Amino acid sequence: MTWQNIKDFFYETVGDTEAAQAFFVEDDVTAWANEALREAVERTEFADYHEDQVSAAATALVTLGSPSAIGLWRVEYDGEKLEPVTLDSIRRINRFWADYSATPVAYMLDEQAMTSDLLAFRLYPVPGADDDNIAIYAYGVQYIISDTSPTQPVNVPEWFAYALVFGMLVRAYQADTEMQSYQRSDFYRMLWDDALMRLRGRSYGRLNKRWEFQQAGSSRKISARNLIPEHIPEPA
């Protein structure tokens, strides 16, 4: 499912066209799509984001390059997994933690922050060398939606793609336009929450998010009819 497909469905739903943009301009529609996509990631953790960076000596702070990434779940330094720790636990074992420089062995959970919509976190110890590989894994889609690539597939399960429009309509009808309607926004919020609940259930259940249907095989199936006894005695 491409971004163009979803955008066409959005404009059709509101009785508008991309060419006319009588009610909602394209830039706003794209922004609402990315906001809805980010909300889906925050609430369901349905997708994984991966990014590679290189270390810089004496620089402990690492900032990811995409606003779609949230919630770290694994960090590797030169192929070795780093342990998630807290600043308090580091202070207990090393009073001079801020200046201690060596090969990082951990990253700080409570030192994560959002800077201009970009996730940043701190390594411990401070890297002592340049150009070591840092592999970062987080929850998030690999790329954001952009009007410069309308034919690029949207990184969501196929069955969920059109449900993304519900999240966009929640924001569209809340916006300060001639089409503003909080009642319609609330209606699409119910549909959006229902879609997210289904996506969350499949994500946390480790089930196939694509919801593919398999054709029935020729093997004998268990039926309730086979469990009925041949003779049922009358009550005494």
Image (spheres, grey):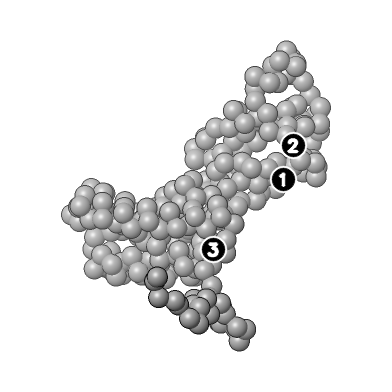
Q: Which residue is mark 2?
A: 82
Q: Residue 50: where, in percent of width, then height?
A: 65, 51
Quarter occupied by residue 147: bottom left
Q: Mark 2 or mark 1, which is nearer to you? A: 2
Mark earlier in primary sequence (2, 1): 2
Going by the numbered disc 3, the residue's amino acid type is Lys
Quick one: SS at disc 2?
loop
Question: At label 2, which amino acid type do we have?
Answer: Leu
Labelled pair 2, 3 in contact (Cβ < 8 Å): no
- State the mark number for residue 209: 3
Tell me whether circle 3 and circle 1 mark residues in contact (CB < 8 Å).
Answer: no
Q: Which one is nearer the viewer's eye here, 34 or 157?
A: 157
Q: Is residue 7 left or right of residue 205?
A: left
Q: Name, please, the residue furthest toward the top.
A: 95
Asked which secondary structure carries label 3, the reply is loop
Q: From mark 3 to mark 1, how far is it between C-alphas?
A: 26 Å
Residue drawn where x is 55% and y is 43% of the image: 70
Q: Earlier in the sequence, mark 3 or mark 1?
A: 1
- The vertical placement of 58 against 29, above or below, is above
How crowded is the residue under tag 1: few (<14 C-alpha within 10 Å), some, or many (20+)?
some
Residue 32 seen by the camera: no
Residue 126's tag is none
Q: Position of residue 51 (x, y in %)?
A: 66, 49
Q: Is residue 8 left or right of residue 49?
A: left
| Residue located farthest toward the front when viewing the structure as drawn | 236
Q: Which mark is residue 135?
A: 1
Q: Residue at x 60, y 83 (%)?
A: 220
Reply above or below: 59 against 165.
Answer: above
Q: Secondary structure at mark 1?
A: strand
Q: Is residue 37 left or right of residue 180?
A: right
Which of the marked residues, 2 or 3, is nearer the chain's N terminus?
2
Question: In the rendered structure, which amino acid carries the disc numbered 1?
Answer: Ala
